[in-house]
Image (cartoon, helix red, strand yellow):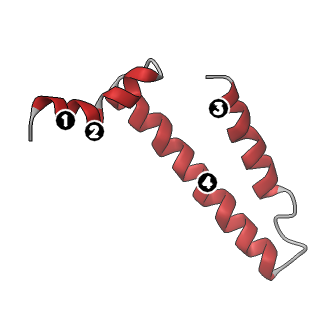
Amino acid sequence: MSRSALQTLFLDHPSSVDETYFEHMRFAGSFAFWLLVAGTAALVHALIPAACEKTASNIVRRLSARIAGR
């Protein structure tokens, strides 16, 4: 694989948001973790309506604020 293909795959996007590859990996990994938690809470809520009533929406609001603040 050529240098430019590697740059396109791994470096161009992080650079476009003013992050290094590892900074972007940390941000995206954290974001993915919280999306999984929100999805799990929503599934629990679907099965047991009294459980996790606001958990998923609170997480999504917090994640939205993180994106908006970038």
**Mark 3: which secondary structure?**
helix
Mark nearer the viewer, 4 or 2: 2
Q: Which residue is mark 2?
A: 9
As drawn, is 49 to the left or to the right of 24? right
Residue drawn where x is 44% and y is 17% of the image: 18
**Mark 2: which secondary structure?**
helix
> Distance from label 2 to label 1 (Cα)?
5 Å
Image height of 69 relative to 44, above or below: above
Q: Which residue is mark 3?
A: 67
- The answer to whether the residue labelled 2 contacts the one labelled 1, judged by CB atoms less than 8 Å apart, is yes
On the rendered image, what quadrant is the N terminus found in?
top left
As drawn, is 21 to the left or to the right of 63? left
- The answer to whether the residue labelled 4 contacts the one labelled 2, judged by CB atoms less than 8 Å apart, is no
Tell me how many marks there are: 4
Q: Which residue is mark 1?
A: 6
Residue drawn where x is 49% and y is 35% of the image: 27
Q: Earlier in the sequence, mark 4 or mark 3?
A: 4
